């Protein structure tokens, strides 16, 4: 650990993934599996094992009590109650007696015995019908991890309950880790791996937490306790920032604030260009917790509701009632505005930890609609919950990763049978519910006329479309430099999709991350997109930009950049257009 301000500054570079600047203490989070050792213990050493166990229980009790008190103070007694349950699990007599019996019968080290017993309890509770009992699995999991850490003497970091305000430095952060992040204490995050569109980064953006990813080796160069500054605008991390550096950042922050205030002053105005063309600006969300901000940003509804967050936070497949409530909350908060609920896009980097998801991080595998069509019970449960939520507002259904007409038709057949079932039960839903598809696989782009003819709307998922088109894994920091939205192949494909949808008069939107970047928003408008769906915090700048350009200029810009063969030239031209529109604010 280094003293702040007295040590030399070290600058690390990465990819600017989520804007903002964070300054605070680093906590290095290593995800390596907890390796529980297994070894034989001599008869005369059994008592020593039990003494080690008693000591670890006392340490764990003190830790849980400290976290409990901290949470009670900051969030209230209600939120702290979960830790009372953890204390009960920790000191459960039946469980502790089983550990002693296990020790005497196996004569193995105590952590091995404890882990065996805890795993047996977890399997038992997981098989329970009762939802409340099933949820005890995560309590036992949390407590046993804590206790095992104390027994094995490893570093303890629980992303869900950080002990103090911290910046997490990690090899990677999976979407399920991100779903658990302690939003109250997390100042920012830095990862060795990852790219701009990895799902944990998208989550950081929606939480408005600064992030720098793809640093390759930050976990090796930063140690827990270091003072670091994370600049999510420029993609740099400063270890031991000097007083001078902190002063400069303070000044920059107040300039950025002034700029943001100017953007925000137009937030309640419509997204209309100087020559009167309008485009609808909608929000990408992961759940109801974001809706207050979405409304404050005057989004015209939700253009992409990524439902996976609900599943990841649930650590499994939530029952219909839980999903229905989660969807209804968002739909009601949106009021008159539409909410496009995307069906489950599990797989790729989002795994729920179920044995059904066998691909190891494969974006081209059993993912999204493929997974849902192969697991009809899971799909049906979700469709029932979405349809029921449609009785409360303006809901649309969108399928992810459609790669051909068969998939679309099969998904629609399941949807029709779910509707029939709900009708026979007398359950209310919107009979005229619109159904759309994401265009994010190149094969879908190639058959855009066919797809547009059988859908009510389309939305381009550029995060995936670009990775599949250029063959560049969106998570891999070693190929992140090849991830290029300005690649002529990307621009041509986007134009062909938008032209095809316009010809069929099927509304077309863009919901990938480029929709939130003014560099690209201009050409998307110029190509003829009907709406953009983006992280709500980026909405003020995009709206300001739209209000300061002409659609005729945007169209001319499209014609011009379509002639260019080098993406650096294209970016330069797009950047010049942006600067012209934003003036001093650029
Ligand atoms: C996309 O692929 O562009 C998209 C919006 O979906 P996701 O990022 O969730 O894959
Ligand atoms: Mg996608």
Image (tube, rainbow, N blue to C red):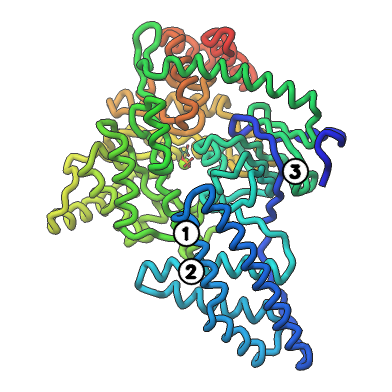
Q: Which of 416 and 229 is in front in this view?
A: 229
Residue placed under numbered mark 3 in the picture: 218
Q: Nearer the viewer, residue 56 or 410?
A: 56
Quarter assignment of residue 422: bottom left
Residue ID at (37%, 18%):
268
Residue mark closest to the camera, 1 vs 2: 2
Secondary structure beneath label 3? helix
N-terminal label among 1 and 2: 2
Secondary structure beneath label 1? loop
Query: In the picture, which quadrant includes the C terminus?
Result: top right
Residue mark closest to the camera, 3 vs 2: 2
The crowd level at tag 3 (other Cα within 10 Å; few <14, some 14-19, many 20+) is many
Q: Does the residue labelled 2 lie within 8 Å of ligand 1?
A: no
Residue 35 in the image: x percent, y percent?
A: 69, 69
Residue 381 in the image: x percent, y percent?
A: 30, 57
Q: Nearer the viewer, residue 582 or 41?
A: 41
The crowd level at tag 1 (other Cα within 10 Å; few <14, some 14-19, many 20+) is some
Classify 504 as above or below 421: above
How far apart marks 1 and 2 lie (CA) works out to 10 Å
Q: Which of 561 and 293 is in front in this view?
A: 293
Residue 378 in the image: x percent, y percent?
A: 35, 59
Residue ID at (60%, 19%):
256
Residue placed under numbered mark 1 in the picture: 315
Residue ID at (22%, 55%):
418
Residue placed under numbered mark 2 in the picture: 137
Residue 425 in the image: x percent, y percent?
A: 14, 58
Classify 132 as above or below 549: below
Quarter assignment of residue 572: top right
How far apart marks 3 and 2 lie (CA) works out to 33 Å
Q: Is residue 402 visible?
A: no
How far apart marks 3 and 1 lie (CA) works out to 29 Å
Contact flag, marks 1 and 2 (Cβ < 8 Å): yes
């Amino acid at each position: 650990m280094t003293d702040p301000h007295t040590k030399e500054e070290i600058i690390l570079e990465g990819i600017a993934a989520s804007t903002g600047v964070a300054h605070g203490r680093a906590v290095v989070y290593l995800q390596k599996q907890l390796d529980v050792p297994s070894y034989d213990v001599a008869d005369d050493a059994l008592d020593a094992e039990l003494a080690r166990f008693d000591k670890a229980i006392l340490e764990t009790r003190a830790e849980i009590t400290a976290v409990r008190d901290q949470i009670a103070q900051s969030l209230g007694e209600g939120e702290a109650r979960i830790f009372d349950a953890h204390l009960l699990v920790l000191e459960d007599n039946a469980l502790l007696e089983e550990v002693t019996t296990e020790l005497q019968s196996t004569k193995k080290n105590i952590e091995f015995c404890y882990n065996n017993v805890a795993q047996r309890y977890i399997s038992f509770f997981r098989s329970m019908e009762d939802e409340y009992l099933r949820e005890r699995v995560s309590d036992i999991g949390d407590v046993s991890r804590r206790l095992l850490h104390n027994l094995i003497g490893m570093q303890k970091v629980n992303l869900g309950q950080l002990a103090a305000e911290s910046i997490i430095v990690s090899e990677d952060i999976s979407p399920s880790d991100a779903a658990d992040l302690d939003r109250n204490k997390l100042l920012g995050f830095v990862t060795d791996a990852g790219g701009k569109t990895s799902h944990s980064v998208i989550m950081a953006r929606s939480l408005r937490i600064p992030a720098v990813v793809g640093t390759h080796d930050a976990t090796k160069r930063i140690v827990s306790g270091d003072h670091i500054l994370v600049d999510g605008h420029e993609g740099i991390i400063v270890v031991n920032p000097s007083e001078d550096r902190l002063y400069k950042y303070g000044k920059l922050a107040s300039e950025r604030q002034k700029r943001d205030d100017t953007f925000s002053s137009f937030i309640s105005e419509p997204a209309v260009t100087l020559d009167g063309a309008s485009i609808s600006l909608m929000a990408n969300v992961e759940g109801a917790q974001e809706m207050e901000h979405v409304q404050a940003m005057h989004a015209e509804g939700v253009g992409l509701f990524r439902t996976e967050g609900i599943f990841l936070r649930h650590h499994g497949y939530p029952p219909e009632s839980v999903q229905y409530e989660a969807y209804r909350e968002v739909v009601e908060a949106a009021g008159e505005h539409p909410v496009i609920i995307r069906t489950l896009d599990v797989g790729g980097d989002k795994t729920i930890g179920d044995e059904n998801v066998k691909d190891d991080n494969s974006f081209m595998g059993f993912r999204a609609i493929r997974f849902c069509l192969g697991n009809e019970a899971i799909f049906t449960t979700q469709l029932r919950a979405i349809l029921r939520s449609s009785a409360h507002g303006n809901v649309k259904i969108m399928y992810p990763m459609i790669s051909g007409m068969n998939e679309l038709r099969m998904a629609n057949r399941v949807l029709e049978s779910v509707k029939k079932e709900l009708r026979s039960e007398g359950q209310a839903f919107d009979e005229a519910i619109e159904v759309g598809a994401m265009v994010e696989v190149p094969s879908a782009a190639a058959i855009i006329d066919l797809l547009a003819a059988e859908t009510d709307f389309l939305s381009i998922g550029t995060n995936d479309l670009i990775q599949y088109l250029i063959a560049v894994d969106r998570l891999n920091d070693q190929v992140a430099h090849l991830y290029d939205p300005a690649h002529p192949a990307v621009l041509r494909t986007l134009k062909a999709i938008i032209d095809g949808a316009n010809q069929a008069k099927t509304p077309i939107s863009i919901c990938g991350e480029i929709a939130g970047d003014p560099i690209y928003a201009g050409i998307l408008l110029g190509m003829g997109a009907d709406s953009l769906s983006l992280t709500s915090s980026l909405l003020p700048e995009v709206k300001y930009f739209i209000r300061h350009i002409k659609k005729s200029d945007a169209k001319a810009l499209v014609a011009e950049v379509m002639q260019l063969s080098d993406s650096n030239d294209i970016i330069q031209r797009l950047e010049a257009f942006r600067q012209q529109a934003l003036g001093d604010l650029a």
